[in-house]
Image: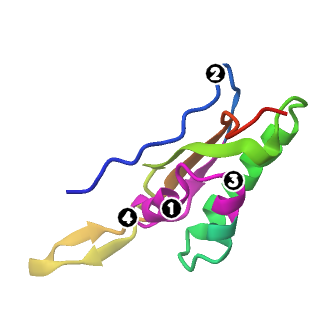
């Protein structure tokens, strides 16, 4: 049985910076393992992991992470070196199933071709400092 992952807790009163990519042209089934890699990691480590990941969803998730980082950079009081991925999830988006596109199946039946999309959401928050405060 898999252990439940413990996520870092944001500092009390810390702001949460999020970004999303809605309608990404990849199946949620294929994108979820990539998002699971970065959940709970510091932002520098998450970006480095995604840079060398070979999955097709890695550049998409990396782009969303960079967007959330840019949103955090617009806030003056945020320390970018303390940001951690506190939420990363992939939800299913609308199906691109054309009404006129079918795939032949058994016994003469026709099934529609369903192209799945995803909504990728990432949230960053500042964690409490490890060690002494500056």
Q: Which residue is mark 3?
A: 43
Query: What segment is highlighted magenta in the picture?
Result: 19-47
Q: Are marks 3 and 4 in contact (CB under 8 Å)?
A: no
Q: In front here: 46 or 63? A: 46
Q: Residue furthest left?
A: 107
Q: How far across and how far down the image is residue 107, in percent? A: 8, 79
**In the figure, 132 relative to 99: above or below?**
above
Q: Which residue is mark 4?
A: 114
Q: Residue at x 30, y 76 (%)?
A: 103
Q: Which mark lies nearer to you, 3 or 4? A: 3
Residue 37 covered by magenta stretch: yes
Residue furthest out toward the top: 13
**Residue placed most toward the observer, 42 or 47:** 42
The residue at which mark 2 appears reads as 12
**Quadrant of the rendered image containing residue 124:** top right
Query: Which residue is drawn at the image coordinates 40% and 66% (left, top)?
Result: 100
- Whichever of callouts 1 and 2 sits on the residue coming sooner in the sequence is 2
The residue drawn where x is 71% and y is 43% is 83
Which sits earlier in the primary sequence, circle 2 or circle 4? 2
Identified at 59% across, 68% down, the residue is 58
Task: Say which residue label 1 marks.
Answer: 37
Give residue 131's position: percent from left, percent from top: 70, 39
């Amino acid at each position: 049985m898999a252990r439940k992952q413990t996520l870092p807790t944001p500092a009390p009163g810390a702001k949460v910076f999020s970004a999303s990519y809605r309608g990404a042209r990849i199946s949620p089934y294929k994108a979820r393992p990539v998002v699971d890699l970065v959940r709970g990691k510091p932002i520098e480590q998450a970006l480095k992991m995604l840079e060398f990941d070979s999955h097709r969803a890695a550049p998409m998730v990396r782009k969303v992470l960079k967007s959330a980082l840019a949103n955090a950079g617009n806030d003056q009081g945020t320390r970018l070196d303390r940001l951690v991925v506190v939420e990363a999830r992939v939800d299913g988006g609308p199906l691109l199933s054309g009404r006129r596109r079918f795939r032949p199946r058994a016994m003469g039946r026709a099934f529609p071709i369903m192209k799945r999309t995803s909504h990728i959401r990432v949230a960053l928050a500042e964690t409490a400092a490890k060690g002494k405060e500056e």
